[in-house]
Image (cartoon, rainbow, N blue to C red):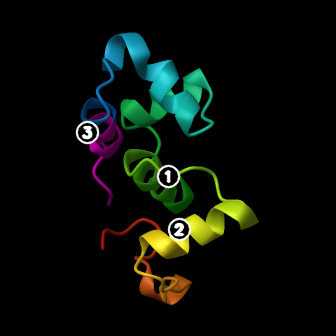
């Protein structure tokens, strides 16, 4: 089982105050306030897509577009990532 504190940890590492800025942090992931609250309180697990979005936001990445792709490739030493879905941890597990 995934730690229910992962969302809270991410919120804190992003510099948000969980009690006052939970909606703002959840909004970055396109979560409604209720969903962010349920997740922060351990009543809902993060999806793999949400975890990937959390990583992207934490790394300062922008939403993907064809034009932005060139910047991403250049930043990764000129080679697109060879990671495929089978290389990622299964949803509900830690990698």
Of 16 and 43, which appears nearest the observer?
16
Numbered disc 3: secondary structure: helix
Return the residue at label 3: 9
Q: Name the residue under label 2.
A: 72
Q: In this view, does 18 lie above or below 39?
A: above
Dot 3 and dot 1 residues touching (CB under 8 Å): no
> Crowding near pointer 2: few (<14 within 10 Å), some, many (20+)?
some
Residue 71 part of the magenta-drawn span:
no
Q: Which residue is drawn at 30% across and 17% down?
A: 17
- How far apart marks 2 and 1 lie (CA) works out to 9 Å
7 magenta-colored = yes
CA distance for labels 3 and 2: 26 Å
Q: What element carries label 1?
A: loop
Range shown magenta: 1-10
Q: Where is residue 38 in the image (x, y as percent from the top left)?
A: 47, 31
Marking on residue 61: 1
């Amino acid at each position: 089982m995934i730690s229910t504190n992962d969302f809270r940890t991410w919120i804190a590492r992003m510099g948000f105050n969980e009690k006052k800025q939970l909606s703002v942090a959840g909004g970055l992931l396109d979560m409604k306030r209720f969903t962010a609250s349920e997740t922060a309180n351990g009543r809902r697990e993060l999806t793999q897509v949400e975890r990937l979005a959390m990583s992207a936001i934490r790394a300062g990445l922008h939403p993907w577009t064809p034009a932005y792709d060139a910047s991403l490739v250049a930043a990764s030493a000129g080679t697109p990532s060879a990671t495929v879905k089978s290389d990622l941890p299964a949803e509900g597990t830690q990698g």
